[in-house]
Image (spheres, coloured by chain):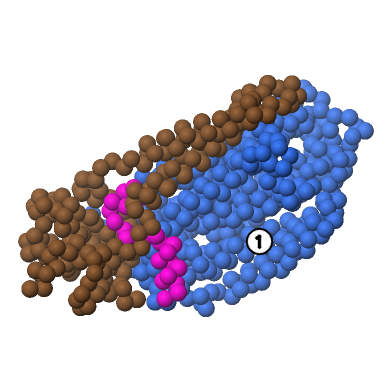
């Protein structure tokens, strides 16, 4: 109790090395730090401008790739029969996994009352929404006739007078993705309302006052409002957990519901969700480490946060390791020769080098983090996270392409190499993501002020490091 | 004289505090004095304040429940109606009512409508959007969202009395105590135009 008084009376508090907030933090300093990133637009680090330039360059690739695709049709891609799903679906899965797992992390840690979530929740949620936006472009581009994508929605008597085929996992995906976008965006905006109100109260610029005044909806921090707000926030967080797990399971149903060897398995949804969490934690590290360095957020996103994320990476790594061995074991124990063929092809076939690179990235690289000394070296954690991102992308590639290229009858066997236009669209989606991240950092409070302030007001305040 | 003429338009008495302990202490004090119509304005949700002020349990969990039920019925109903009643199509000999295959969409619509109900319910019950409120006229209220804590005893409280209430709040270690006027009515006197409206 004494500690709390000290903090709130704007008295500096000594902090330990393992604190969630470092330095002499008061409500005012926290608010100033977060709002000044938005207000002092001319003080953005050079890295922000470089990122924006890179984003524009990549967006150029996206524009050209998509324009050529729309002009010529999907034939410009490397896809063929039997490999009808190429990089587009690989990327769709990869981006979807990032989106679903980051929202799952943010909402799940909220429900588990993990204090270290507080300063990174906004970054996790924003990244989740942007990743799903990037994912969303691929299924549409992949359609032979992208302009009729709305046929997948139950719009009543549409052009053909038909309804969607509700027994198809592709229709489930449409529902999963649109539900995700609506709920995740509202959840994110809900978290933003008090923070926007704070910007509204602090800005001197009339235009910004009008914009934030409208977006804050007249938030006045009333205790009555906070009560309903918190109740709603926790309920929606619970729904988000259910939504993200179910949505990514439905993505895996695209594969598991088919009869393609290597895909047709009840094991797949669990494996996919576990892989998604692994990938999500890695991408969180990839994003948070540079952001905190560029914007000097080390006092808010401390080494403790990085350490926790690294431990989550290790935990989900163990699940993934188990998954790989379980998959191989089921294949062997099941005795189905087509399944065995797929496994053998993954390990020793055309795409075997990719398989072994994936194993090195997903199984071996994260093991470095078991050493506490190396885990505290931020550069090493960052490099490991890059390896995991690459590894998880390769995993989606391998599970998709090997299964399709070696199906039941040798006469239907094929081979797939992505064309330059597919790669352009993939790079373009990274550009889109980067662009959205730049906008986010520029216009939206990077960290949730409400959450940071409750952290300060906690009994243990800045010394709180685990719960 | 001034007090007299604005008595009927007073919204409440507001006290400003430097930290949440003082706010809680003042709330307890006001509660002990018998006040029931109060509200606090804080930069973050202060734990325990809602029970202290005796707010009712929010209705929102039920709203989520009913929203979810509606979503489930609507989602499954849509699939049943389109696949069994409106336009049955035989796909690979599967039954028209393939209810197992209809479950994923049902799950998603359940979540969608539960979330929509609870978020929109929160906004509606809180009266948002609500761009203007008498409390915004309090000087220094722009620090509410940063580091200041406000307690407002509202004029609709049966015990409300300009002098007594002011005195009570002043004795509660407040930085500043002021009257708030409900400006939804026309103001003739210009000298009570609030700070915020000058922006």
Numbered marks: total: 1
Report if residue A338 is visible in the image: yes
Above or below residue A2? Residue A99 is above
Q: Is residue A209 magenta?
A: yes
Name the residue beneath numbered marker 1: A432
Q: Residue at x 70, y 31 (%)?
A: A257
Please name the residue shown 44% across and 58% down the image: A192
Q: Which chain is blue?
A: A
Q: Residue at x 79, y 36 (%)?
A: A403
Q: Is residue A5 visible?
A: no
Q: Reply yes or no: does residue A243 show up in magenta.
A: no
Q: Residue at x 66, y 33 (%)?
A: A166
Chain in brown, by letter, is: B
- Where is residue A12? Give x, y as percent: 30, 67
What segment carries the magenta color? A206-229
Using residue B51 as the reference point, say whether residue A246 is left or right of it: right
- Residue A63 location, x and y as percent? 74, 63
* Magenta stretch, overall SS: helix
Q: Is residue A167 above or below residue B175?
A: above
Quadrant, the C terminus of chain B: bottom left
Specify the quadrant of the image occupied by residue A207: bottom left
**In the rendering, at what x and y percent does residue A378 appear?**
56, 60
Q: Which residue is more in the foreground, B119 or A456?
A: B119
- Between A409 and B86, the one lying in front of the other is B86
The quarter of the picture where residue B188 lies is: bottom left
Please, which chain is the residue tagged with disc 1 on? A
Tell whether B144 sits left or right of B129: left
> In the rendered image of this protein, does residue A287 appear above or below residue B178?
above
Question: In the visual, does A202 lie left or right of A168?
Answer: left
Q: Give the percent coordinates (x, y) of residue A238.
A: 45, 41
């Amino acid at each position: 109790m004494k500690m709390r008084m000290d903090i709130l009376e704007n008295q500096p508090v000594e902090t330990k090395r393992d604190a969630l907030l470092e330095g002499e933090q008061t409500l005012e300093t926290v608010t100033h730090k977060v709002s000044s990133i938005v207000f002092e637009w001319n003080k953005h680090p050079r890295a922000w401008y470089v990122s924006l330039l890179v984003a524009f360059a990549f967006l150029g690739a996206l524009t050209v790739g998509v324009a050529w695709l729309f002009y010529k049709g999907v034939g410009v891609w490397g896809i063929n029969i039997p490999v009808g799903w190429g990089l587009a679906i690989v990327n769709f899965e990869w981006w979807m996994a990032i989106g679903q797992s980051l929202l799952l992390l943010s909402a799940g840690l909220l429900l588990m009352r993990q204090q270290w979530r507080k300063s990174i929740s906004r970054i996790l949620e924003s990244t989740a929404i942007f990743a799903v936006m990037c994912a969303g472009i691929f299924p549409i581009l992949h359609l032979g006739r992208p302009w009729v994508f709305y046929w997948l929605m139950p719009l009543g008597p549409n052009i053909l007078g038909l309804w969607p085929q509700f027994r198809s996992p592709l229709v489930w995906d449409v529902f999963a993705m649109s539900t995700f976008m609506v709920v995740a965006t509202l959840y994110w905006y809900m978290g933003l309302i008090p923070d926007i109100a704070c910007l509204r109260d602090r800005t001197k610029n009339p235009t910004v006052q009008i914009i934030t005044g409208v977006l804050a909806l007249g938030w006045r921090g009333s205790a009555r409002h906070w009560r309903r707000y918190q109740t709603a926030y926790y309920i929606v967080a619970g729904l988000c957990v259910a939504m993200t797990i179910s949505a990514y399971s439905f993505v895996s149903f695209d594969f598991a519901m088919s009869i393609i060897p290597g895909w047709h398995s009840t094991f797949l949804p669990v494996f996919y969700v576990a892989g998604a969490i692994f990938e999500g934690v890695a991408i969180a590290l990839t994003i948070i480490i540079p952001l905190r360095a560029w914007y000097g957020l080390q006092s808010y996103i401390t080494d403790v946060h990085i350490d926790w994320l690294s431990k989550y990476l290790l935990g989900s790594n163990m699940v993934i390791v188990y998954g790989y061995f379980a998959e191989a074991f089921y294949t062997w124990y099941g005795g189905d020769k087509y399944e065995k063929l797929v496994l053998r092809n993954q390990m020793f076939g055309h795409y075997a080098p990719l398989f072994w690179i994936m194993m090195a990235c997903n199984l071996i690289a994260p093991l470095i983090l078991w050493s506490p000394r190396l885990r505290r070296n931020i550069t090493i954690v960052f490099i490991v996270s890059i390896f995991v991102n690459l590894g998880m992308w390769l995993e989606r590639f391998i599970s998709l392409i090997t299964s399709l290229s070696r199906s039941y009858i040798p006469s239907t066997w094929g081979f797939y190499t992505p064309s330059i236009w597919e790669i352009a669209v993939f790079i373009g989606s990274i550009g889109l993501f980067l662009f959205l991240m730049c906008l986010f950092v520029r216009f939206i409070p990077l960290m949730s002020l409400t959450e940071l302030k409750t952290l300060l007001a906690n009994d243990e305040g800045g010394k709180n490091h685990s719960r | 004289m001034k007090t007299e003429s604005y008595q009927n338009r007073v919204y409440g008495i507001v006290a400003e505090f430097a930290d949440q302990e003082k706010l809680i202490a003042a709330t307890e004090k006001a509660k002990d004095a018998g006040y029931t119509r109060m509200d606090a304005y804080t930069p973050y949700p202060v734990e325990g304040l809602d029970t202290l002020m005796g707010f009712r349990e929010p209705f929102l969990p039920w709203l989520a429940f009913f929203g979810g039920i509606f979503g489930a019925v609507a989602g499954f109903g849509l699939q049943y109606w389109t696949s069994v009643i409106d336009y049955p199509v035989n796909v690979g000999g599967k039954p028209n009512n393939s209810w197992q295959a209809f479950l994923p969409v049902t799950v998603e619509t359940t979540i969608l409508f539960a979330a929509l109900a609870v978020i929109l319910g929160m906004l509606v019950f809180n009266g948002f959007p609500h761009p203007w409120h008498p409390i915004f006229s309090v000087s220094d209220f722009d620090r509410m969202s940063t580091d200041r804590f406000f307690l407002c005893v509202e004029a609709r409280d049966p015990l409300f009395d300009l002098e007594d209430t002011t005195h009570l709040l002043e004795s509660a270690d407040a930085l500043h105590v002021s009257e708030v006027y409900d400006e939804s009515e026309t103001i003739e006197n210009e000298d009570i135009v609030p700070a915020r409206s000058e922006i």
